[in-house]
Amino acid sequence: MKIRSKLIITAAVAILTAMTLTGCATKEEKEKAAKFQSEAENYMAGNNYEAATASMKKALEQNPKDKDLQAAAEKLKKKAEKMSGYTKTMQAAISAIEADDAQTLNNLQISKEGKELMELIGNEGSYLYFPNGGNSGKGIGFYSFPNCTCDQWYYGDYTEGSREGNGIWYFVNNNTDDGSLYKEVYTGQWSGDKPNGTGHQLIASGENIYTNQDYQVIDGLFDGNYPINDTLADGTAVTGNYTLTKGKYVVITDEELTANSFAIPEQPHLAISFLYDVTGAIRSCTMVYAENVTEGVSHFR
């Protein structure tokens, strides 16, 4: 009996020794390697090649002799070398947007790395980056549009690559007449890959702020009734209201204009609103012409 047990133990030791010498992985090591490889693939799906490389290294440590794993690691290495610049660009963009640093974001766009990213996505495309891998959760996207030099950023919540939840839509450039920095920033709710719900829009150029207001949004278009607080050229404070229905100003008829002593424009027109002074008297009326009647988040309007 003792001889039999000794033979079994000796055989087991011999097998383990052979596995060690040949580099064969145990079942547990193979399972760990598969887990790390799956983790690496998840990071690659989110364009996080730094994290993917780290996970693949752990996989190889568990099963270094696996030919398929070696091939996958080599393929990842080559891809990571090519994509590392894009990863750094997206990480820098996250920091700039979190800090609302439009100047840094613009510098990033016009840098060599930013231009390479624009070339990568082409005239109509996007590049998404997820720090935690995959294509859901917190991420950042860089988007381009046909016949438009208005490449824009989104930083926020995603579900399977679609913008869902809360996020920031950011556009910035310095192609202004006076060279000042122009930016449009929408911060709010998203669903169906579009702004939907409540949000806030800021439009500014240099020190001048043109819009700084909360909105209700339907598929990127502003909707609802909004107050006006303005000052006329003579210093008179005026208040009023205007209505938007899916981004379009509610029409004020020619009869209403005539009844309030306003001339009817010869061009097609929609009236934004009447402005009132503190006594309730109408002081002015602003016209919006047919080609400029839709208001909403930049590139959704």
Image (cartoon, rainbow, N blue to C red):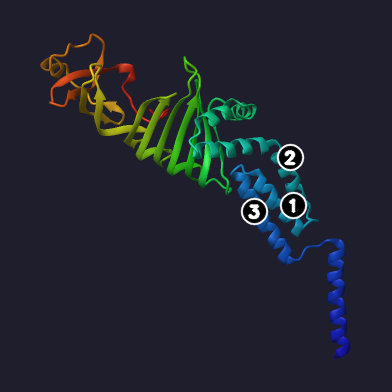
Q: Which residue is mark 3?
A: 38
Instruction: Residue 32: give x, y in percent of width and height.
Output: 69, 61
How far apart marks 1 and 3 lie (CA) works out to 11 Å
Instruction: Residue 60: give x, y in percent of width and height.
Output: 75, 54
Q: Which residue is mark 2?
A: 78
Assess whether mark 2 and mark 1 are in contact (beta carbons under 8 angstroms): no
Q: Is residue 298 left or right of residue 248?
A: right
Q: Name the secondary structure under disc 2.
A: helix
Question: Can you say whether 261 is above or below 182 in the image?
Answer: above
Disc on the earlier residue, 1 or 3: 3
Q: Is residue 214 left or right of residue 156?
A: left
Q: Name the secondary structure under disc 3.
A: helix
Q: Which residue is mark 1?
A: 69
Instruction: Residue 136: give x, y in percent of width and height.
Output: 51, 47
Could you say which is closer to the camera, residue 245 or residue 272? 272
What is the total number of numbered labels drawn onto the structure image? 3
Callout 3, which amino acid?
Ser
How far apart marks 2 and 3 lie (CA) works out to 18 Å
* Quarter occupied by residue 88: top right
Residue at the outermost top position: 266
Q: Dot 1: within a 10 Å radius of its alpha carbon, few (fewer than 14), some, or many (20 or more) residues?
A: some
